[in-house]
Amino acid sequence: MKISKKKIGLFLGPLLFVLIKLFFHPEGLTDAAIGILASTTWIAIWWITEPISIPMTSLLPIVLFPLSGGLSLHETTASYGHQYIFLFLGGFILAIAIEKWNLHKRIALTIIKFVGSDMNRIVLGFMIATAFLSMWISNTATAVMILPVGMAVIAQLNDNPKTIKNENLLFGKMLMLAIAYSASIGGMATLIGTPPNLVLAAVIEKTYKTEITFLQWFMFGFPLSIILLYLCWLYLTRFAFKATQKEFPGGKKEIENQLKKLGPVTYQEKLIFVVFLITALAWITRSFLLVKINPEIDDTIIAVLCALVLFIVPSQKNNEALMTWEDAVSLPWGILILFGGGMALAGGFETSGLATWIGNHLTMLEGTSVLLLLFILITSINFLTEITSNMATTAMLLPVLVSLAVILNVHPYILLVSATLAASCAFMLPVATPPNAVVFGSGYLKIEDMVKKGIWMNIISILIITFFCYYILPLIWNLQELYRFY
């Protein structure tokens, strides 16, 4: 009888929790830290094996931390109301509004039409459209939205008698991977683009009482995304797949047909676009312009305010506003709970002293060059997130890296940012990221295709992130010295 991974994890998590609480009492580790360690082990095993859903596992700290003596109930539950959860909430509401009125589809099709109808250019158009949307909308929603457009274009190639035999299958594989990869890459560009970015911002705010602004992250994340997206396009079109047919028969026509189906730009789309632009501009200019008007203004305030506006502005349909509560109930509440669980873990690691204790036991890395250290760290996390949730991974590791930075006397931002970016770059397996799973469901790809093509994208991302975090991050964020931060 074969025992599933879920059943093993279901019993292994609680078992290790009990064993650690009863028998693991090393010198220097307080009872509170042992409680946090035991609880984190249980949570990590359930996050990896998923005997219950990841969001429900993320509620375990509320039960385990107080009962194990790790953290009080008040301190634990406070993490689930962290300000960045509401930043995400506002961003999600804006994304739902964009999707509700089909603005996302019009933006994507317009970008693809603008780029051109050459095969490689169509792939580039899809990648730019997907990455741009993923900067503001969840990468899952972006992939789900772009997928049908991509499949319609592939079908156009399949149905055309001028098409070279099997060329549509090759193009289908290339386009599906392009959509998945660019959804993940685009999310790295902004603070709200992917959950690990906000986990990083929250850990830094909680640990160092320092805020990473939307603009500060954008100045670093956007150029990184652009370069990674361009290299990804070159890799897919020149090396991973070599299409013999350059011109796409009927491709431009198919994009125009889909744009015609949308009809003229609606009043609602115009309003949503205006709110979207105002929100983005407010986030970007807040740190150097809006704070002069009111120093209390914050990215979270901007997000919630713009979300509220969507519930006020009339849509001219059925006497309703652009957004109603019925629309908002489709919010990805699970991600918000997961984020809260991650913040609870970070708080437990810091308050109990567990992160410091772990960091003190990583002295074997002392003397390692920062560049080599980053390469090892980024590579490890990159491949780890092929089988684990990228947000869960960052939530578990960032508090440990805070202490490791002290031991190695390295600027902590270097380690924290490297780990966060690496967690968004899992390209090999369908389970690695939601966009990977979405395109795998199209039927064009086999796991073998994803592994063979994805491993090279993993390697490319590891090298680029290592380079950016070592050479570019200190310049953009004015981290004057990698060492002697403390």
Image (tube, grey):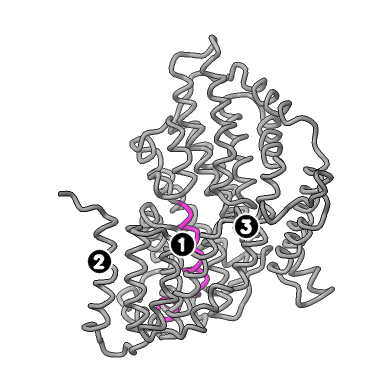
Residue sitting at the far front: 318
Q: Is residue 75 left or right of residue 20?
A: right
The mark total stands at: 3
Mark 3 touches mark 1? (CB < 8 Å): no
Question: What residue is disc 2 on?
Answer: 12
Label 1, residues with CA under 10 Å away: few <14, some 14-19, many ≥20: some
Label 2, residues with CA under 10 Å away: few <14, some 14-19, many ≥20: some
Question: What residue is disc 1 on?
Answer: 55
Q: Is residue 319 left or right of residue 149?
A: right
**Under tag 3, what secondary structure?**
loop
Mark 1 touches mark 2? (CB < 8 Å): no
Disc 3 versus disc 2: distance between alpha carbons? 37 Å
- Amino acid bearing label 3: Thr
- Front residue of this view, candidates 312 and 90: 312
**Under tag 1, what secondary structure?**
helix
Give the residue at x 62% y 21%: 251
Q: Residue 452 colored magenta?
A: no
- Front residue of this view, candidates 484 and 120: 120
Question: What residue is disc 3 on?
Answer: 190
Majority secondary structure in the magenta region: helix
Q: Quadrant of residue 355?
A: bottom left
Give the residue at x 56% y 80%: 208
Q: Residue 422 colored magenta?
A: yes
Disc 1 versus disc 2: distance between alpha carbons? 19 Å
Give the residue at x 37% y 59%: 52
Disc 3 versus disc 1: distance between alpha carbons? 23 Å
x then y, percent, for residue 230 = 56, 42
- Amino acid bearing label 2: Leu
x then y, percent, for residue 335 = 52, 60
Precedes in sequence: disc 1 or disc 2:
2
x then y, percent, for residue 402 = 46, 76
